[in-house]
Image: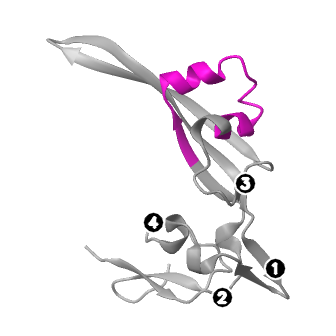
Amino acid sequence: MEQTILKGNCVKCGECCRGLVVKFELNEKQMQELADKDWLNNPLEIVKVIGKPCKYFDFSEVTSLTTELVMEYTYDKNKAYKSGSRFAGVMRGVECKALVKRGNKYICSIYKDRPTICKNYPRDNTKLKDECGYKKVVGNGKSN
């Protein structure tokens, strides 16, 4: 099996910090907290319940919100019993307020103290944008 590795350097395009995708889950207690709120049309209500994954993320301009109800069952002697449920969801279009444009480059204003999610970028399962200075290279040296 060929290994995918990342090569290159940051070119300060800022694409990794704009239009972020944030995955979340709501347990039954959190779903009850949101029951009387218009949370499907207002992602900020979800953020109030689950908390921000990063204090610099701005959820005010979320472009899309998708959720699905996940039913959980426990099996005992070939019988299924509902053991719980949760919502799994994705918010797209989250922006990072720490990204600052200087000329035609983007600079992270908190680079030395940036969150772990940023320190780990890019990972080998990251979808890289064309502008990104990092490229995925398969073990035989071909770029993807």
* Residue range highlighted in magenta: 23-47
Assign a secondary structure to mark 1: strand
Question: Residue visible at 55% across and 66% down?
Answer: 115
Q: CA distance from mark 1 to mark 4?
A: 27 Å
Assign a secondary structure to mark 4: loop
Marking on residue 7: none
Q: Which of disc 4 and disc 1 is earlier in sequence?
A: 1
Can you tell which of label 4 and label 3 is closer to the viewer? 3
Q: Is residue 75 left or right of residue 22?
A: left
Assign a secondary structure to mark 2: loop
Whether pointer 1 and pointer 2 mark residues with C-beta atoms closer than 8 Å, the reply is no
Image position, residue 20 (x, y; %): 66, 59
Q: Which of disc 2 and disc 1 is earlier in sequence?
A: 2
Residue type at mark 4: give it: Asn
Q: Which of disc 3 and disc 4 is earlier in sequence?
A: 3
Density class for disc 3 (Cα within 10 Å; few <14, some 14-19, many ≥20) is some
Question: Residue visible at 64% across and 73% down?
Answer: 129
Q: Is residue 27 magenta?
A: yes
Q: Is residue 24 above or below residue 130?
A: above
Can you tell which of label 1 and label 3 is closer to the viewer? 1
Q: CA distance from mark 4 to mark 2?
A: 20 Å
Q: CA distance from mark 4 to mark 3?
A: 19 Å
Can the viewer see residue 137 in this picture? yes
Density class for disc 4 (Cα within 10 Å; few <14, some 14-19, many ≥20) is few
Residue occupied by mark 4:
125
Q: Which of disc 3 and disc 2 is earlier in sequence?
A: 2
Residue occupied by mark 3:
93
Q: CA distance from mark 1 to mark 2?
A: 13 Å
Marking on residue 11: 2
Viewer-proximal residue, 59 or 5? 59
Q: Is residue 79 left or right of residue 7?
A: left
